Image: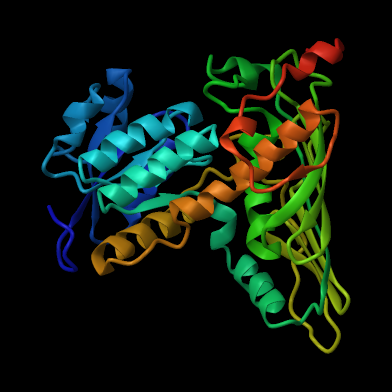
């Protein structure tokens, strides 16, 4: 194995749970990339993924350090619970392996920065996974903003009003924990919309946030809202929940003084720009609004893995490098901090001292609907 332009890139899975098949299926579809190793603490699960998506040469491990010593391995996908990402990524970087990390990069900014530093120090590529950035619709909207078609940006809003059942939260001990999930409706689900909002609108200067646990008997937020002021002067709103029925399709609204664009489930549903007409789409489904397995096809992951493979071969930055993937986590942590302070204004960037876990939002609620 190797990383020259004509050599096969050997890819491995760190963690073989729910999201791993999306990575493995993507690897199967990409010329010049091969699944060479699967690692999971549950050896039978790693064996099953290797059998389904690899071949007779795909190695199976339950010890991460042994997998990282595999000479056939060039890059890894980190598919474990969020609070494990940095530790595993740092080990991978120290072993000289390139890294594609599921969202979020980790659950604290300090841990994320340690991962970024390890990748830089060991001269390996680090890329984050945010599928919404890869869609053609996103490219069209970003280009419209870049070229001034919307005029001066006025509002940028992200709405992710989802439903997640008790069974979902009970499906893994790591779910809805500060240590391994990093939070609730914002850090696990809302992070996608928040990343896309930042990708389109730019950085946030300050915000006010409120987080609550209104329905589920969990120790993290199931509902959150925030008002934003962007560096460019525009204002915005974030709404996120996992406790509404039946769950609504994710929506992004970008408005300027010359036009408005709305995206629903990554489709352009409104394009109201004077002098321009494009084909808009009616959303055909709600995506992951009420079904956490919806949208777990390999389409976005094919683009992410193809991009990182090309970045490795051509020694360039991936499209979503570590520092870019960090941005959404910082905004989420700022919302948590504001909520801890009773909705007080929080200025960005944050310091590590402000980068603690969120409070136990359920303490002030007490209404459960199982």
Q: Is residue 122 above or below residue 360?
A: below
Q: Would residue 115 appear left or right of 252 to someone viewing this image?
A: left
- Identify the coloring: rainbow
Q: Is residue 174 above or below residue 100?
A: above
Q: Nearer the viewer, residue 137 or 315?
A: 315
Give coordinates of residue 285: x percent, y percent: 72, 49
Q: Nearer the viewer, residue 362 or 270?
A: 362
Which of the 4 image quadrants contains residue 368? top right
Which residue sits at x=37%, y=30%?
Answer: 87
Q: Would residue 264 appear left or right of 366 to someone viewing this image?
A: left
Q: Is residue 288 visible?
A: no
Q: Nearer the viewer, residue 150 or 331?
A: 331
Q: Nearer the viewer, residue 160 or 353?
A: 353
Quadrant in which the C terminus is drawn: top right
Give coordinates of residue 312: x percent, y percent: 27, 61
Which residue sits at x=82%, y=55%?
Answer: 236
Q: Is residue 364 visible?
A: yes
């Amino acid at each position: 194995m190797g990383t020259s332009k004509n050599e096969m890139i050997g890819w491995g899975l760190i963690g073989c749970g729910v999201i791993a098949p999306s990575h493995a299926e993507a690897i199967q579809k990409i010329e010049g990339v091969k699944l060479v190793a699967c690692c999971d603490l549950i050896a039978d699960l790693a064996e099953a993924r290797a059998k389904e998506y690899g071949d007779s040469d795909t190695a199976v491990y339950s010890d991460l350090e042994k997998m990282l010593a595999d000479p056939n391995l060039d890059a890894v996908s980190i598919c474990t619970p969020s609070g494990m990402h940095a530790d595993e990524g740092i080990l991978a970087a120290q072993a000289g392996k390139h890294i594609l990390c599921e969202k979020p990069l980790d659950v604290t900014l300090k841990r994320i920065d340690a991962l970024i530093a390890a990748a830089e120090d060991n001269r390996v590529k680090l890329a984050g996974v945010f599928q919404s950035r890869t869609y053609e619709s996103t490219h069209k909207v970003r280009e419209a903003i870049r070229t001034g078609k919307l005029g001066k940006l006025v509002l940028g809003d992200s709405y992710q009003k989802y439903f997640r059942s008790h069974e979902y939260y009970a499906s893994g001990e790591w779910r809805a924990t500060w240590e391994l999930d990093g939070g609730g409706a914002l850090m696990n689900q809302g992070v996608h919309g928040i990343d896309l909002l930042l990708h389109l609108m730019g950085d946030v200067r300050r915000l006010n946030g409120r987080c609550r646990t209104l329905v589920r008997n969990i120790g993290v937020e199931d509902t959150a809202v925030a008002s934003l002021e962007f560096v460019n002067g525009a204002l915005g709103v974030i709404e996120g929940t996992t406790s509404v029925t039946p769950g609504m399709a994710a929506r992004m609204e970008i408005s300027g003084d010359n036009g408005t664009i709305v995206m629903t489930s990554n489709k352009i549903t409104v394009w109201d720009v004077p002098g321009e007409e494009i084909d808009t789409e009616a959303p055909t489904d709600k995506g992951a609004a009420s079904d956490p397995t919806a949208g777990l096809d390999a389409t976005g992951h094919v683009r992410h893995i193809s991009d990182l493979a090309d970045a490795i071969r051509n020694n360039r930055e991936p499209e979503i490098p570590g520092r870019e993937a960090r941005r959404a986590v910082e905004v989420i942590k700022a919302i948590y901090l504001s909520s801890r302070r009773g909705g007080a204004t929080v200025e960005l960037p944050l310091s590590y001292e402000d980068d603690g876990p969120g409070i136990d939002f359920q303490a002030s609620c007490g209404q459960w609907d199982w």
